[in-house]
Amino acid sequence: MTAPTTPPTMSRQADEVLLGFTRALRAAGVPVTQDRSQGFLAAAAVLGAGDPRATYLAGRATLCAGPDDLARYDPVFHEYFGSRDGLPRPRPAVAPPAPQLSGLPLGDGDGEADASDEVVRARASDSEVLRHRDVAALSNAEKHRLAGMFATLTPRPPVRRTARHRRWHRGQVDASRTLRSSLRRMGEPAEIAWRRRGVRPRRVVLLVDVSGSMSGYADALLRLAHRFSQVAPSVETFTVGTRVTHVTRAMRLRDAERALVAAGETVPDWSGGTRLGETLRFFLDRWGQRGMARGAVVVVFSDGWERGDPALLGEQMARLQRIAHRVVWVNPHRGKSGYEPVQQGVVAALPHCDDFVAGHSLATFAELSEVISRA
């Protein structure tokens, strides 16, 4: 009986070269996850990393997930791997040109610096335009670019005061500490000690509508929830539609792509109907009333299309407002010209909301982060 064969392994140098190629693909907009990178290394080891054609086919089979990825793959491969013989190696880095002195006239030189400035300005302008685009109207390539731009968001969790005090350079007089300091000096006057109440992060609860009318925004909203979960320790995330699903554990994964895949495997009602009143009542009965929503900042992401009873939604929103510190309703249509809050769900919920903000672009997500941090 023969022992089972194991896949061949590559040298450490070849591993580093191939992993560098995956990073170049990720920088070009291809969503290369850690799992895909490991699959690429395994496929290259089996096919033979010394064969450029085999390496090319292994990358296309493991690192690309759609036509947009394939369109980016070929130019990056030929740009990264210079040689065709043996194991491809990355081209040596070229030192950047020296910056032009500001005192020189604009017309001097051969025009290369001006051309590079135009390219930089064009790219910056494209990124700024993309920040303000409606995420539901983006192409697949633009969504890949936008996914990388979520890292620029730096949400700060809201804080609340605690019962305990901490030392501070001003505030209230800390009589006990001042007296103890005076007794250590045999009753001689001592420096006055000050104190103030401590602070700790306030819980944030995100309720993301994943019904059919919100399908164009669900991916971006879950990426926003993932970003909040990475920078704030006390963030709880739920998806709502025809039922309520707790996806906080999936959002805690460090890699955004793996987090969205895990959430997709957990949520059973993608692109279904919307029963906000019933799902909100279930959330309050099971989690909110027991303490998760009590004193928290609750953010509801929904367009307000309600298939159930709007009166029930109004009752549950009033109940939520009584126990939460602040209720924020995020509507992706809020920032569009000509929008009027006439949907039955929005009309029933608005009297019980502290903030009604837009949520259709990366720029509005940044503004929402400020609203939450100031709550």
Image: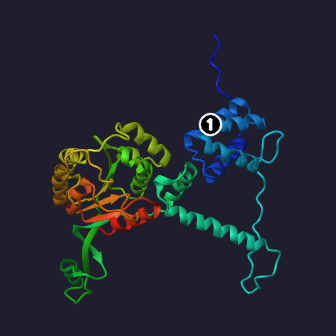
Residue 345 or residue 176, whichever sits in front: 345
Q: Residue at x 84, y 40 (%)?
A: 85
Q: Residue at x 76, y 35 (%)?
A: 53
The colour mode here is: rainbow
Residue 6 or residue 187, whichever sits in front: 6
Residue 63 or residue 201, whichever sits in front: 63
Label 1: how many Cα within 10 Å (few below 14, some 14–19, many 20+) = some
Residue 325, compared with residue 89, is above or below; it is below
Q: Identity of the amino acid at label 1?
A: Thr
**Residue 214 in the image: x percent, y percent?**
38, 49
The number of callouts visible is: 1
Q: Is residue 39 left or right of residue 355?
A: right
Q: Is residue 19 left or right of residue 136?
A: right
Residue 343, compared with residue 196, is above or below; it is above
Q: Residue at x 46, y 52 (%)?
A: 136
Q: Is residue 168 left or right of residue 362?
A: left
**Residue 92 in the image: x percent, y percent?**
78, 56
Q: Secondary structure at mark 1?
A: helix
Q: Is residue 10 visible?
A: no
**Residue 217 in the image: x percent, y percent?**
42, 51
- In the picture of the structure, the residue carrying the numbered disc 1 is 62
Q: Residue furthest front?
A: 338
Residue 51, compared with residue 163, is above or below; it is above
Residue 257 or residue 71, whichever sits in front: 71
Residue 340, compared with residue 49, is above or below; it is below
Q: Is residue 291 visible?
A: yes
Can you say which quadrant of the picture contains the N terminus?
Answer: top right
**Residue 3 in the image: x percent, y percent?**
63, 16
Q: Quadrant of residue 37?
A: top right
